[in-house]
Image: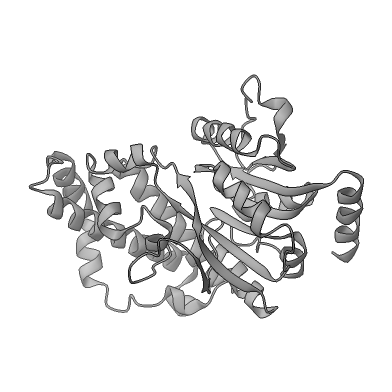
């Protein structure tokens, strides 16, 4: 690892790039290329490189006009953790700026980094840059059942998604204990020292493990509210896709817990399964009912509760899948 880092330093001295934006993506090209275009526009004239890593099993078709402005690599079906690590290995920047394939970088964010971070950067400092759904998407949330659920849970903001209580700050930089790779800025040096992302965790929970590794080497984690990025999840507002993603995430986390990559206490809590089983067996009826309900204001609270219940059910179903595979005693 040390030899790799020395090689990276040599590359930076030969061709100085200050910021490497790294985007991992899988089977989401329409959203991805809009994100890439936003990043290109936001970084015009800055010493920034944009690296896209394809975690999917099909080759990207890069739109005309973008190919010479980005570096694109294939790392098929190895998981988002491996994709991000692969991006780092092919980067030349001093700072790593991880964004999701639906996160719009803004000129404001790049200018803030250049003004506040680059002149005298403390390599131990790690920054979560604030994000919110785009204003245009905020309006659509009220028109969909999943959107209403996201609004009710405050999942349309970084503050709410990171399960932070209290009023979201308007400005400032605040100490924190978690990272969110959707908008994460840190030095390459501290990332490598922390060991990078745990590639055994292919989807979800990789952020929790990275945060633990960073804190273990005395990194300082912050949330930055002086800038705003935009989280464009417009393609994830349908009920079926939303629940499927939740189920996939939980199953991956339970698998990781069983392998010892996550704390196994994460996989406990289902000793009494009667209620969960009842919900599982009647899930088609709940989904049918939810589908037939109008999405207006009157039934908004009801559909929100239903989606919340179905979201919790996905966690139980994922647990049950892993339980059948490995046995309950092993998970405990």
Count of marks overlaid on the render:
0
Residue 282 in view of the camera: no
Vertical position of residue 305 compared to residue 56: above or below: below
Q: In the picture, residue 273 is in which quadrant? A: bottom left
Q: Determine the residue located farthest toward the top in the rendered image.
A: 64
Q: Determine the residue located farthest toward the left in the rendered image.
A: 298
Q: Position of residue 85 (x, y in %)?
A: 70, 54
Would you say 215 lies left or right of 15 here? left
Front residue (pair 323, 201): 201
Would you say 123 lies left or right of 98 here? right
Would you say 161 lies left or right of 56 here? left
User: At x 30% / y 58%, what residue is drawn?
Assistant: 311
The N terminus appears in which quarter of the rendering?
A: bottom right
> What is the image's colouring?
one colour
Q: Position of residue 185 (x, y in %)?
A: 63, 58
Front residue (pair 189, 305): 189
Front residue (pair 286, 14): 14
Front residue (pair 29, 253): 29
């Amino acid at each position: 690892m040390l030899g790799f880092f020395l090689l990276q330093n040599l590359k930076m001295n030969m061709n100085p790039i200050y910021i490497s934006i790294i985007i991992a993506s899988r089977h989401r090209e329409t959203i991805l290329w809009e994100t890439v275009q936003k990043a290109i526009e936001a970084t015009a004239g800055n010493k920034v490189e944009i690296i896209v890593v394809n975690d999917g099993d099909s080759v990207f078709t890069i739109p005309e006009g973008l190919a010479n402005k980005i570096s694109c690599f294939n790392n098929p079906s190895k998981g988002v953790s491996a994709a991000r690590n692969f991006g780092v290995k092919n980067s030349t920047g001093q700072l790593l700026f991880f964004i999701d394939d639906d996160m719009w970088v803004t000129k404001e964010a790049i200018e803030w980094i250049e003004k506040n971070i680059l002149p005298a950067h403390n390599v131990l400092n790690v920054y979560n840059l604030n994000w919110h759904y785009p204003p245009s998407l905020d309006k659509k949330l009220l028109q969909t059942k999943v959107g209403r659920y996201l609004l009710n849970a405050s999942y349309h903001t970084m503050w709410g998604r990171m399960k932070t209580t209290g009023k979201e700050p308007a400005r400032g930089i605040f100490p924190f204990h978690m990272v969110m790779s959707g908008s994460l800025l840190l030095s390459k040096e501290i990332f490598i020292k922390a060991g990078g992302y745990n590639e055994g965790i292919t989807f979800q929970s990789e952020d929790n493990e990275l945060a633990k590794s960073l804190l273990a080497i005395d990194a300082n984690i912050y949330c930055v509210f002086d800038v705003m990025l935009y989280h464009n999840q417009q393609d994830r507002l349908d009920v079926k896709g939303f629940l499927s993603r939740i189920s996939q995430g939980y199953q991956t986390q339970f698998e990781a817990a069983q392998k010892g990559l996550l704390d196994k206490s994460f996989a406990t809590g289902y000793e009494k399964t009667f209620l969960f089983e009842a919900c599982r067996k009647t899930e088609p009826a709940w989904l049918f009912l939810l589908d037939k309900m109008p999405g207006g204001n009157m039934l908004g609270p009801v559909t929100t509760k239903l989606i919340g219940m179905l979201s919790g059910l996905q966690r139980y179903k994922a647990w049950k899948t892993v339980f059948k595979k490995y046995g309950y005693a092993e998970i405990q």
